[in-house]
Image: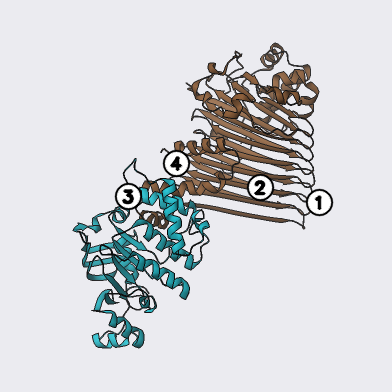
Chain colours: A brown, B cyan
Amino acid sequence: MTTQTILPVNTESLQATSLRNNEPNWLTELRLEALELASQLELPRLEKTRIDRWNTQSYGAYQESTVIDSLENLPVSVQGLIKDEALEGSLIVQHNSGVVYTHLSSELAKQGVIFMDLHTAASEHGDLVKSYLHKAIEKGENAITALHAALWNGGVFLYVPKNVEVTLPLQAIFLTDEEQSTFAPHILIIADTNSSVTYVDNYVSGEIEGNVVHNGSVEVFVKAGAKVRYATVHQFGNEVTDLSYRRAVVENDGVIEWIVGEMNDGNTMSDTSSILKGNGASTDAKVIAVGSGAQKLNYTTRAQHFGKNTPSQMITRAVLREQSTAIINGITKIEHGASKADGQQTEKVLMLSPKARGDANPILLIDEDDVTAGHAASVGQVNAEQVYYLMSRGISRTEAEALIIYGFLAPVVSQIPLEGLRTQLQALVERKLGR
Amino acid sequence: MTTNFVIEGLKASIEGKEILKGINLKMKGGEIHAIMGPNGTGKSTLASALMGHPKYEVTAGSVLLNDEEVLEMAVDERARSGLFLGMQYPSEISGVTNSDFLRSAINARREEGSEISLIRFIRQMEAKMKELDMNPEFLHRYLNEGFSGGEKKRNEILQMMMLDPKIVILDEIDSGLDIDALKIVANGVNAMRSEDRGFLIITHYQRLLDYVKPDFVHVMMQGRIVKSGGPELAQRLEAEGYDWVKEELGIEDETVGQA
């Protein structure tokens, strides 16, 4: 069956918005091409997930945002998300369709680090943006990527020059609280040769009357010897459909580390890929997720090995409550010529209710002989014998189950190298578990 | 008040099959009782039924701990009222450290707001671990995960020492232990002997009883206690086996239910 993509915007208004925002011509053209593609492309086919039945239409329209001069003007819920280091350091806040707050520490600015919204970057650093935008995630892949390329707004552009090592994490917050506003941030990160950087972002929704689609893309380019740590926490309410693509292209001896906290209350498609292009490039992806209510979730982690001696490590752990459903795919693809590649993946699902459903699908696609690869997957319920054992020491059933659930997530959570993020995730897990 | 533990007419079944066919036993604080018997006679079922394992259904009888009906309590309430079962096959729980687990167990016995301080807890635990010749790193290891058989058993004894129970049931705590580990476990038990604590030691070897002297010895067959006596009974069983008991009582097959 072919589903006709209903375009949320027509060519004229897309063009008008682009002009009003003083976007360079190449960008306006790119958006129009993407819109044209969107009308021809279909939604992606997801394993065992009928995304065509989800709300993927509520894009609203582009709305102007008012820049704020002080963080005190942000909603309180958002202020709580700002990590201590970011208060003094570097922070970007997007509210609905536009970035409303940008701060880059003067020290980093002096070192040549660029950290600004992507609109501004497209004008001020046009050549750089143009040569990377939509190069990792192409606009023509499917209707979602095409619509994203047509509609993206706000977003982040982060460029770290050669040999610059940024020690404090840079942070961004994306807030949606108006159903009539398009919410489609695009994050573009370029870590130049031998640089290193940690970037942390939070996706959050406020009170929304109707429905919102978050159509987000993250593109990370890791140059030779560079290291990027990308941590993201999604905590949208159930009014938000979250469609997120993340993809890193890693060159020789580069490192991409992903930490993804999936704490949404609404339907979510989350696709995180690392393309290990160069020799010695490596990736480590950790995903922790809690599903509740009637959520439909589809999580994919993927490592594609082109370079020789490329290790990849992917771990997903999901806890499912109530009637939530999660399809968890791990895809290790080793291309011909990627000798001495090592791809390891683990997907584990813990179901807390008889109505919850989890599927773990480890997939190894290997076109080279001289490699090592492994996978482990398990889907199960809280073990009654374990609950009995804990209770036999005086621990209540509720507490025993909580210990087992946190224990299930702990091997991943404890590996998260950022303390603030770890604490935040623990609190979110507790909230999602209804405790 | 000295501890009183009274089992009367206890019957229990698993998947509809009756395993315990009426157990009667009285214990007081300060006493050590040993339950012996060949495999498959219901000894471990007795331990599990007393603790409230969900797989076993108690169909008749009563179990009073200081006049309170244990059988009406949930598993965690039984533990908090003073019952402890050192298990034959302790569960492994990934992601939960030994110390987090034990601290939760101790705090479950305390009022909210009067939880044990972390420092005091760690000090206590380290001291007990030293007594049991356990590596301090076991504090931070995940509960029983990757522990050897002997390490698991020592960990059971560690929990017993930390939780200070009134009635301790040890289910085949000696199985899988080498002689050194056995002595350490026995020392742990002996160190815990006191006037207000009773022990019920389930074993099918005399071995452990060389180090922990029982006051009473009971033999289980066919889901019942068929013979009781003093420590000399254990010695005779060790020397002569169980056949004479079977002969004396006219029992051909001593087992009950599934082996």
Instruction: Give, as a three-letter code, the residue at label 4.
Output: Gln
| Residue pointed to by mark 1 | A337
- Please tell me which residue lies in front, A109 or A156: A109
- Please tell me which residue lies in front, A144 or A386: A386
| Contact? badges 4 and 2 (CB < 8 Å) | no
Residue A156 location (% of width, % of height): 67, 25
- Distance between mark 4 and mark 1 Cα atoms: 44 Å
| Residue pointed to by mark 4 | A323
Residue depicted at x 41% and y 58%: A385
Q: Is residue B63 above or below residue A45?
A: below
Q: Is residue A386 above or below residue A414?
A: below
- Distance between mark 1 and mark 3 Cα atoms: 61 Å
Crowding near the residue tagged with mark 1, few <14, some 14–19, many ≥20 C-alpha atoms within 10 Å = some
Residue depicted at x 68% and y 17%: A14
**SS at circle 2:** strand
Q: Earlier along the polypeptide chain: callout 4 or callout 1?
A: 4
Q: Work out whether residue B221 can be spotted.
A: no
Instruction: Give, as a three-letter code, the residue at label 1.
Output: Gly
Marks 3 & 2 on one chain: no
Instruction: Give, as a three-letter code, the residue at label 2.
Output: Ile
| Contact? badges 2 and 1 (CB < 8 Å) | no
Marks 1 & 3 on one chain: no
**SS at circle 3:** loop
In front: label 3 or label 2:
3
